[in-house]
């Protein structure tokens, strides 16, 4: 998949001027070119840009980041994720987007599970999941000719809601938790296709859930 500098900037949160300066000063994240000489960022470059944004929020200088390979940058972000004392929500956002881009269910599941445990269900959805889903929604617009990608992410969300629902007890669900579950698949309201989880189906999945979560989730 090819992304313009405008698209890469919108998804990653790194402005275009900054991307250009990294390219010129550090020869870092240099766009590829098509046969007709149009500049573009590959999927790997987009993931690296997301990860770079995370490391910058960790106070690591771009001059240091730029000396590393894409794999080293990714591994460094993952090491921050494994640090139980790290409270940087950008790590979770980047990993969710990476999981969506790379069709990586294990990465998606591990990120959500740890996020639920660390931040709680409500905060995780409000402060992390919604942000990630908004960016994924834009990626879907860019990848509009790739319905399989949308289907993959929608199935992940549906399965995760089902998994969480199984861990909830009785029917005394609070209003805010109910709305978070119901609305999470509907961040992409500007799109209308069969890959979205229907409101009826989502409601059915969570109607027996409550705020009481079993010890498995560590709340």
Image (tube, grey):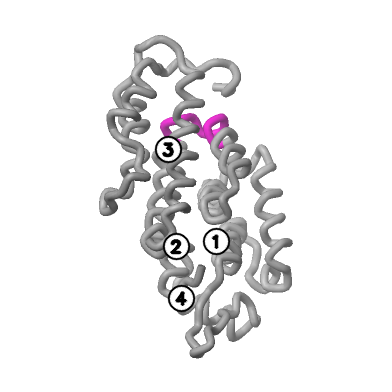
Which residues are the magenta region? 115-123
How many angstroms separate mark 3 from mark 2 (CA)?
19 Å
Mark 2: which secondary structure?
helix
Magenta stretch, overall SS: helix
Is there CB contact under 8 Å for labels 3 and 2? no
Q: Closer to the camera, 116 or 151?
A: 151
Magenta stretch holds residue 93? no
In primary-sequence order, the first of circles 4 and 2 is: 4
Q: Is residue 1 left or right of residue 203?
A: right
In primary-sequence order, the first of circles 3 and 2 is: 2
Task: Say which residue label 4 marks.
Answer: 5
Is there CB contact under 8 Å for labels 2 and 1? yes
Q: Residue at point 54% right, 66% down?
A: 46
10 Å crowding of disc 3: few (<14), some (14-19), many (20+): many
Rendered image: mark on residue 125: 3
Task: Say which residue label 2 marks.
Answer: 11
Foreground label between 4 and 3: 4
Q: Residue at point 39% right, 39% down?
A: 126
């Amino acid at each position: 998949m090819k992304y313009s500098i405008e698209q890469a900037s919108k998804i990653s949160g790194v402005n275009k001027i900054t991307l250009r300066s990294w390219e010129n000063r550090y020869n870092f994240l240099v766009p590829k070119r098509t046969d007709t000489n149009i500049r573009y960022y590959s999927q790997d470059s987009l993931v690296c840009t997301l990860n770079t944004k995370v490391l910058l929020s960790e106070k690591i200088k771009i001059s240091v980041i730029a000396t590393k390979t894409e794999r080293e940058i990714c591994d460094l972000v993952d090491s921050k994720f494994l640090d139980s004392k790290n409270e940087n929500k950008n790590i979770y956002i980047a990993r969710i987007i990476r999981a969506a881009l790379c069709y990586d269910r294990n990465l998606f599941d591990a990120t959500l599970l740890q996020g639920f445990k660390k931040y709680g269900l409500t905060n995780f959805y409000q402060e992390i999941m919604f942000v990630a889903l908004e960016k994924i929604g834009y990626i879907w617009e860019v990848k509009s000719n790739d319905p399989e990608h949308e289907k993959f992410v929608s199935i992940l969300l549906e399965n995760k809601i089902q998994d969480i629902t199984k861990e909830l007890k009785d029917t005394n669900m609070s209003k805010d938790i109910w709305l978070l579950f119901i609305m999470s698949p509907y961040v992409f309201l500007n799109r209308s296709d069969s890959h979205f989880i229907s409101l009826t189906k989502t409601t059915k999945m969570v109607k027996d859930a409550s705020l009481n979560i079993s010890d498995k989730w560590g709340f």
